[in-house]
Each structure stands twice: as C-alpha cells, then as structure tokens.
Image (spheres, rainbow, N blue to C red):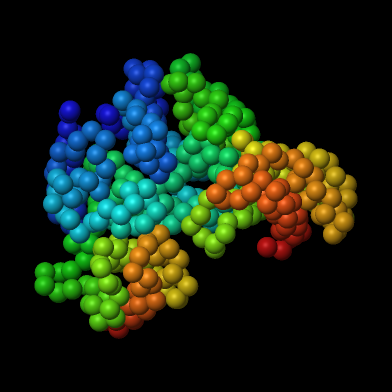
Amino acid sequence: MSRTHVTCTINGDEVEFLAFDGQTLLDALRDEVQLIGVKEGCSTGDCGACSVILDDMLTCSCLVFAPEVEGRSLTTVEGLAEGDQLHPLQQSFLEGAALQCGICTPGFLVAAKSLLDKNPDPTEEEVRYAVAGNLCRCTGYDKIVRSILSAAADIRETM
Amino acid sequence: MKYAAPVTVEEAQHLLASDEEAQVFAGATDLIPQIRAGRKQPPLTVDLKRIPRLVNMRVEGNTWVIGAAVSAAQLSSNPDLAVDFPGMTEAAALIGSDQIQSRATLGGNLCNASPAADTVPAMIVNGAVGVIATSEGTRMVPVSDIAIGPGSTCLAPGEFLLELLVERPPLRTADAYLRFIPRTEMDIAVVGAAARVTLAEDGVVESSRIAIGAVAPTVLRVDEAEAALAGRVIDDDLLDEIATAASERGSPITDKRGTADFRRHVVGVLTKRVVAAAAQRAGGSQ
C-alpha cells in the first residue's frame, strides 16, 4: 500500500503527514497527526462530530480524502483555545453545561466558531440552522444554542 | 485505492483513460459513504476540484456556465444566480447541513443519479444542458437525459461532466422548487417538484415546464400539465387539473420514506403549489 505525502496548515502550523490510500481526513487527523479532538460518529456526513473548518468552510472531515487538503488550511477544535486560555465558546459551553457525554462537543464548537466568524450577532434561528448538521444524543440542544448565543455576546463585548 | 488531483481537463482525461474503473468525484459526499458501504471500490479516485474550469461559475452572453464541481454553498451565495433562478438556488440550498453545503456539488447531485436529487428537477425546468468531456472533446446532453436510472447515467467510461449551461430566463419567467420531507430540514426528498412559468403580458401562461422527482426511477416532465396550462389563466380549477396530471404521471415505489399512494398524492399537491409559486414570481413578486 502506497502512502501520499501531504503538507497543509492546521491551526496555524505547517503540518506534514503520510496518508494511506483511501484514508479520510478524519482518520488522518486522528491517526497520523494525533489530533484526536475530531470525533468519529456516523462517518456518513450526518452527525457533524468530525467537523473541521477547511479554507473557511465548515466541513465533515469524514467526507474528505486526506490528500485533498494538500496546500490548504484547516482549523480543528484544538485550534480554538489560545494556550491555557479557553475560547469564549468553550468557556460558555462549560458554564452553560452544554455537554453531557461530550463526543459531539468538538463538532458543535467548530460549527459554532464557523458561524461566529461569519456572523458575530446571530439570531437563535440562525444558530439552530448553523448547528443543524450536528447531532447530540444526550438531547442537550437548548443548552448548546444558549451557550453559543452567550459566547457570541461575550465576543462582541470584547471587540 | 489511489488518489489523483489533475489540474487540467486533459490531465483528467488521461488519468481516466489509464483505468476504466477510475471514479471521478467532486464533493465526495456520496462517494465516500458508498465506498464505506462496500458498494464501490474504485482503484483510482480522480478529484476534479483542482481544475479551475470546474469550480467557477460565470455568465457568458446570455448563458450561465456553472462548473460541475461548484459547491452548493457557492451556488446559494451567488446573488445574481438567485435573481435568475430562485428555484434552482433554493433547491441547492436545501441539500444537507452547512457541512454538506460546502462540499456537495451540482454536478455530483446530477451524476450520482438519485431519483430524489433536489437540484435535478430545478435544472430540467430551466432547460439546463450538461457539457461532457469525452475522449474526442466534448458533447452536450440535456440534463433530463443524463440520469437514466437510479445510480446510472449516460456517461461512458472515461467521460465526465465539465459544466452545466443554463440560458438566462426570458421576461416574465420564474422558477420554483418544493419538496416534501417529514421534518423541516436535513432529509432526502420523499417527493420533489419544480416548475418554470412564463406569463404573457395579459397574465395567461405562455409556456411552462414541470418536473417531478422521487416518483419514478428518473425525474419526469409532466407534459400533460404543461399542455393544460398553456394559454390559460391560473385558477383553482386549473391547479386541480395539473395536480391530477402529476399524480397520474409517476410510478412511485413504497419505501421507508413513504408509500406509493402517499407519493402520488403529495406530488399532485406539490405540483399545484410549485406552479402557483413560479407564476407568482413570474408576475413580478417573490
């Protein structure tokens, strides 16, 4: 089995890895780059647990072949915090108890960041549409939506 | 399974000629799940997104030229496209979540050849034509003739869709697309219906095209309803007449999404509503 050399930017750092034939970006991030914040849920693009931002667009990493990211720029959940300083979304999820088991949380955080990067003052409806591709089986949607709205307000205050 | 990302059409053609089993892809939203489910095992996957012609859209003269690998997000964020084709734009915007919108493409929606593809009825009513790269050059095929059955297209091995051509609509013309799903978002059409209506100055229907999805192996035109609309003013009786024509046109199946009888009923209701919506837009109001 041959491997493909891939160079890309992940969370601001240049990263090189070797992708197996047919390997998805999700598997390469977890197994080759050791970024295990990205989670595998359904692997069919339904659940959003593997969400990453690929060149400014929210994407399911399970639906991307790893070599597709050659030369491109990625943000994963590991790119949200700055050192020990949590991202306002992460802080807000903690304070709002917006998670139970936590497996969907990285995907929700990345989807929420993608929304707030484009729309810093979303309505509740806009938030619900923005996370419609993310499933939570602990039924915590209301707390998640409220935490995203609260983080948006916090970010606007500091801007 | 090898991966290749050609940057020119010629390079892609060369790769496809090297292996008859090679599989082109754009967003891969259908291909990767098909590979995982064991339904496809291509030895070579050819990513078309690095070919500039396939990921750009523009107006040339009176024609929209939309690259086959243009994403749904690109389509639904183009304000000029939404003015010319509000129905086709809303059909693209209905596909999946933001995560899927960034990847799913018009060309993929067509070539995956699902009977329930949302953009296909909308492309058909707008008379869209596919430009297909062949070993000799290109050939043009109306979108209505590209899918020939569930999962199968008229494309020969080595051929792939380059772009879609859609003529800008004439005056007093508009399209619309509606689908039925049992929830508000994030689902596959149980039934879909698209219409394009051109009104004469006095408000009678000059011409129309109606296409219905998920009620037959391929998207169907409803010729009888189109004929019934010609030269008439749209009223409730006429809408009931075309609803009946649409219900009788399909040959739906019963599956987990709905029974055949339910689909026959709903396709009539949607046809009525989508024609009324297109006519209202053609009359100048959105």
Residue name at image x 85 percent, y 45 percent: B228
From the viewer's side, name the closer residue of B286 and B65: B286
In what quadrant of the picture does the C terminus of chain B appear? bottom right
Residue name at image x 84 percent, y 50 percent: B241
Q: Is residue A121 above or below residue B3?
A: below
Report whether residue B254 is seen: yes
From the viewer's side, name the closer residue of B179 and A84: B179
Residue B174 pos. (x, y %): 70, 52
In what quadrant of the picture does the N terminus of chain B appear? top left
In the displayed structure image, the side of residue B39 where residue A9 appears, left or right? left
Q: For the image shown, how many numbered marks are present on the structure?
A: 0
Q: Is residue B141 above or below residue B196?
A: above
Report whether residue B166 is seen: no
Residue A47 pos. (x, y %): 36, 57
Residue B268 pos. (x, y %): 74, 51
Residue name at image x 20 percent, y 45 percent: A28
From the viewer's side, name the closer residue of B132 and A66: A66
The single residue placed furthest to the bottom in the displayed view is: A157
Residue name at image x 40 percent, y 44 percent: B29
The single residue placed furthest to the left in the displayed view is: A84
**Image-quadrant location for residue B149:** top right
Q: Is residue A146 above or below residue A135?
A: below
Q: Is residue A110 above or below residue B82?
A: below
Residue A21 pos. (x, y %): 23, 33
In the displayed structure image, the side of residue B114 where residue B34 appears, left or right? left
